[in-house]
């Protein structure tokens, strides 16, 4: 089989998604489980988005708008960026893949911090590229280490800010300095999937940095804040030249009709956004307070999730909590075997997590 597949594919391991509630309950014969493993919005989807989907269902016999005109127009208005600098994707995951397919050739080099979003390495390796992983420094992205890892073959650098799975964020000043030191012919992918949850005003915002580097690509998603993870819709900002090249490679109907309608409506749902941020911030306060009482270490976060260092290792605690119907994320695949990662849930879900954690440790 080796000759039939692209370089690197045989060594790839499938991405380990969070276990679905339905699968857990089917396997263990239990009911009433909760899932705090995949950084999802605990409130569900935006109500305005749901209504937009219902209104659009009768048009499913037609192909989607391949240009994404209305969604891009709404994004352009909201962020004051020309539509020609906006690209839509089947989730921001597809935009990562689209960047690699557009700009990397087999044998080219990419750099990522590690641990970070596991999809970066998967896509680069699957495309026949070589990935260098620069270890975090005290669980923070080592920008100087990334700069030192650049070679003449480097085509793409990935920065997840705030970083998944650690929740830490890079400041605007640090990011500007970093971008100014990057060679001008390297694509810098700034993945801001969790940027809306940031509370530290010093944190870098990719929209403000587009003029700092000619090949900066800022990626965002509707999966987290707006609760549209199941529809797979993301968007990116870059120069018109970069977007034009990506559109040459992009599939013509990559953003489906319902996703476009839902995302366009969700951008107007300020009440839902406010409620989401309130639930997350109050949930973080509750969880951290109780973890302090238990005496368990955790990592401060700028996102809707965070890392908890657990006695006995993350895998053990993950499995014990599964049996209690509480799904969290073990961090073994991120080379953080002592940790679990949890998303902030509804108040009753957060309470159940704390009660279950007390029991299993």
Image (tube, rainbow, N blue to C red):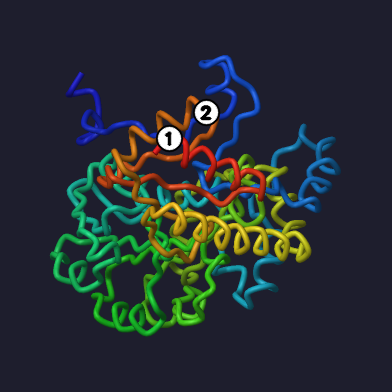
- Return the x and y of residue 120 as percentages of the image width and height: 34, 49
Q: Residues within 10 Å of mark 2 (few under 14, many from 20)?
A: many
Contact (Cβ within 8 Å) of mark 1 with mark 2: yes
Q: Residues within 10 Å of mark 1 (few under 14, many from 20)?
A: some
- Residue sitting at 73 percent across and 57 percent down? 266
Which residue is under mark 2? 324
- Return the x and y of residue 284 as percentages of the image width and height: 55, 60
- Return the x and y of residue 311 as percentages of the image width and height: 31, 43
Q: Quadrant of the N terminus?
A: top left
**Residue 70 seen in render:** no
- Return the x and y of residue 323 as percentages of the image width and height: 48, 25
- Residue sitting at 30 percent across and 66 percent down? 140
User: Can you say whether 231 is above or below 226 in the image?
Assistant: above
**Residue 300 seen in render:** yes
In the shown orientation, is residue 149 left or right of residue 209?
A: left
Of the two numbered discs 1 and 2 on the same chain, state the one appearing first in sequence.
2
Q: Which mark is residue 81?
A: none
| Mark 2 element type | loop
In the shown orientation, is residue 226 left or right of residue 186?
A: right
| Front of the two marks 1 and 2 | 1
Camera-nearest residue between 115 and 345: 345
Which residue is under mark 1? 360
In the shown orientation, is residue 267 left or right of residue 310?
A: right
Camera-nearest residue between 52 and 195: 195
User: Can you say whether 194 is above or below 24 in the image?
Assistant: below
| Mark 1 element type | helix
Q: Cα distance, mark 1 to mark 2? A: 9 Å
User: Can you say whether 270 is above or below 17 in the image?
Assistant: below
Q: Quadrant of the C terminus?
A: top left
- Residue sitting at 47 percent across and 69 percent down? 238
């Amino acid at each position: 089989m080796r000759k039939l597949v692209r370089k690197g594919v045989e060594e790839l391991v499938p991405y380990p998604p969070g276990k679905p509630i339905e699968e857990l309950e089917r396997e263990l014969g239990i009911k009433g489980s909760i899932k705090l493993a995949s950084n999802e919005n605990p409130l569900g989807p935006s109500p305005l988005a749901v209504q937009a989907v219902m209104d659009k269902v009768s048009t499913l016999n037609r192909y989607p708008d391949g240009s994404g005109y209305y969604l891009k127009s709404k994004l352009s208005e909201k962020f004051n960026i020309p539509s020609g600098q906006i690209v839509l994707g089947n989730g921001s995951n597809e935009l990562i893949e689209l960047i690699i397919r557009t700009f990397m050739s087999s044998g080219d080099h990419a750099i990522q911090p590690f641990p970070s979003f596991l999809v970066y390495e998967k896509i680069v390796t699957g495309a026949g590229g070589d990935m260098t992983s620069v270890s975090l420094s005290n669980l923070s992205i080592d920008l100087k280490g990334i700069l030192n890892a650049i070679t003449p073959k480097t085509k793409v650098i990935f920065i997840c800010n705030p970083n998944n799975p650690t929740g830490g964020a890079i400041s605007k000043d640090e990011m500007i300095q970093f971008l100014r030191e990057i060679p001008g012919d390297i694509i810098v992918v700034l993945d801001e999937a969790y940027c809306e949850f940031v509370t530290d005003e010093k944190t870098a915002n990719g929209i403000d940095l587009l003029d700092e580097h000619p090949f900066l690509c800022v990626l965002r998603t509707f999966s987290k804040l707006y609760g549209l993870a199941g529809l797979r819709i993301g968007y990116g900002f870059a120069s018109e030249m970069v977007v034009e090249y990506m559109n040459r490679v992009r599939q013509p109907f990559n953003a489906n009709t319902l996703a476009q309608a839902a995302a366009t409506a969700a951008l107007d749902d300020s009440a839902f956004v406010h409620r989401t941020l309130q639930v997350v911030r109050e949930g973080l306060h509750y969880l951290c307070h109780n973890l302090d009482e238990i005496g368990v270490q955790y990592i401060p976060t700028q996102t809707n999730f965070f890392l908890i260092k657990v006695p006995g290792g993350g895998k053990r605690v993950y499995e014990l909590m599964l049996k209690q119907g509480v799904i969290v994320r073990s961090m073994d695949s991120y080379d953080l075997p002592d940790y679990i990662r949890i998303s902030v849930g509804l108040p009753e879900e957060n309470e159940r997590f704390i009660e279950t954690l007390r029991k299993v440790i």
